[in-house]
Image (cartoon, rainbow, N blue to C red):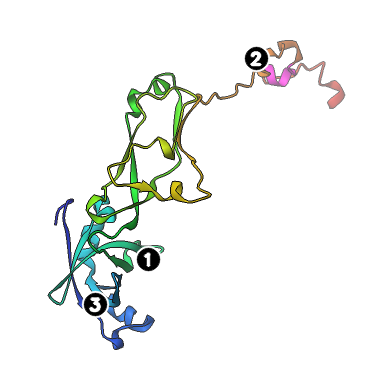
Amino acid sequence: MSINHFELNAVNRSAEQQGKGASRRLRKQNLVPAIIYGGNEEPTSISIKINELVKALEFEAFFSHILTITVDGVEHQAVIKDLQRHPAKGFPMHADFQRVVKGQKIHMNVPVHFVGREDAPGTAAAGVLSTLVSDIEIICIPSQLPEYLEVDVSGMEIGDLFRLSDITLPEGVVIHELELEDGHDRTIVNMQPPTVEEVDEVADDVDADEVPATEQNGEVDAEDNKDGE
C-alpha cells in the first residue's frame, strides 16, 4: 500500500452478520463492519480487518483517492464517504464506501493545503494568517480527482484574503458550493493585523505619596497606629 495506491481486502457479511449486535461481535474479532454502495449496484455489506484499515487511515491521501476494495476476490473501485470512530479511543467502528464508475462525476471533500505562509509579507509584519477551511467539496470524474487543493499565500499582506473563487483548480474540477444557484463565494483564508496586548499603565502613573505606608515598606509608624490600638 502506498500514498498513490490503496488496496483493502474485505469479505461479504451475511444477513446474520448485520445489525448492532453482530457488529459488536465483528469488532471483538478485530473486524470493522462497512458497506459499499452506488454504481447502479445493490449495496454490499462487508467487513475489513481493523489493522489494515487503521494503517490506510494514517495517510491523508486515503480520503481523496480511488480505492481498490477486493471482496471475496472481486475488485470494487470506490471512495470513502463516511467513517465512524469510537468517541473516546478513536479507532474505526464503521465505514461507508461509494463505488465509482468510469466517466461518472463524483462529489468528494478534498484537503486544502496552504503554502508559503513563512514567505508572506503579512507574516513578516507580524500578521496572523487565519485559515477558515480544512477541506472543500469538489465535483469531477474519478480520473481527475486531486489528492488536495493548494492555495499559495506567499504574497498575502495584512488585510488580504482569498475566496473560494480564487483557488486555482485542476482541469475538470469544480467547487460544488460555487455551482449552486445560491452559492456563496466565502472567504477561505485571510491575513489579520498583529494581535496587540493591552498594557495596564495605571500602576505606572500612581504617585508614591498615594500608596499607604503598609504597601511602601510593610511598616506603620507608631504614631499613625495609635488610633488603631
Residue stretch rendered in magenta on the structure: 211-216
The residue that mark 3 highlights is 29
Magenta-drawn stretch, dominant element (helix, strand or loop): helix
Q: Nearer the viewer, mark 2 or mark 1?
A: 1
Residue 176 lies left or right of residue 115; in this view the side is right
Which quarter of the rendering shows the C terminus? top right
Amino acid at the residue labelled 3: Gln
Image position, residue 173 (x, y; %): 32, 47
Q: CA distance from mark 3 to mark 1?
A: 16 Å
Q: Residue at x 81, y 21 (%)?
A: 225
Judge the density around disc 3: few (<14), some (14-19), many (≥20) Cα neighbours within 10 Å.
few
Q: Secondary structure at mark 3?
A: loop
The residue that mark 2 highlights is 204
Q: Give the vertical position of 68 relative to 179 (above or below).
A: below
Locate residue 24: give its quadrant.
Answer: bottom left
Q: Give the vertical position of 12 relative to 36 (above or below).
A: below
Amino acid at the residue labelled 1: His
- Lower sequence index among marks 2 and 1: 1
